[in-house]
Amino acid sequence: MTIPVLPLTLVSSLERCLVTSVAEARSPFTGTSQIQDWGASWWEYQIEMAVTQGAKARRLSAFFTALGGLRGRFLFPDPSIAVPLAAGNPYVTEVQAAGASTLRTAGWGLGLRAGDFFQLGGDATTRLYQLTGDVTPLGSEATLAFVPPLRASVPVGQVRQQIV
């Protein structure tokens, strides 16, 4: 099943935020607190669409109508993320389970910086991740530390779709 891509020409502004399922429980008697980390996190976007008329307005309306409400999903290539020069042809070298925040990889041509983004998966399984530390490959191998944690296990050889 192919997932539709939001037409970027109609996006006028956006905000990206990493949401985490962390809560604080504070005692009303002692004032002490406990931090509860439920282990989930995800990206949320606030997207503002350009005011459109005519054919562009009909195209945007048709795009959202075709999604069928809450059951529909679409891909969003974030235009605020700059795509760096080609960084080799990276791939996963060690199986990593859901919930992990590191990934052993190889095939790198260049290092990456904290804050760079990469994506894994395709269509409905596409996920966006952000590096939390600089990555300098040893030869072509590198371990990536990132957020949010993996939602599903990543098999050996899983090629990244795009480094953004």
Image (cartoon, rainbow, N blue to C red):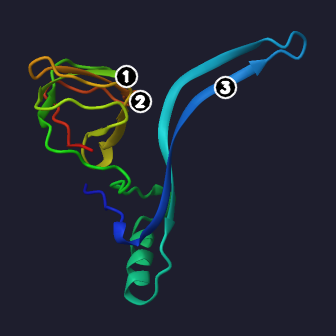
Q: Which mark is residue 101?
A: 1
Would you call the spot at circle 2 few (<14 residues within 10 Å), some (14-19), or many (20 or more)?
Answer: some
90 versus 97 height, above or below: below
For the N terminus, the image quarter is bottom left
The amino acid pointed to by label 3 is Ala
Task: Name the residue rendered at 71%, 14% in the picture.
Answer: 34
Question: Which residue position is annotated with label 2?
Answer: 147
Counting residues from the start of the chain, the first of labels 2 and 1 encountered is 1
Query: Which residue type does callout 2 highlight?
Result: Val
> Label 1 sits on what residue type?
Ser
Viewer-proximal residue, 55 or 70? Answer: 55
- Residue 7 in view of the camera: no
Q: Position of residue 127 (x, y in %)?
A: 34, 41
| Residue holding disc 3 | 23
Crowding near the residue tagged with mark 3, few <14, some 14–19, many ≥20 C-alpha atoms within 10 Å = few
Residue 154: assigned label: none
Quarter assignment of residue 21:
top right
Residue at x-position 15% and y-position 32%: 110
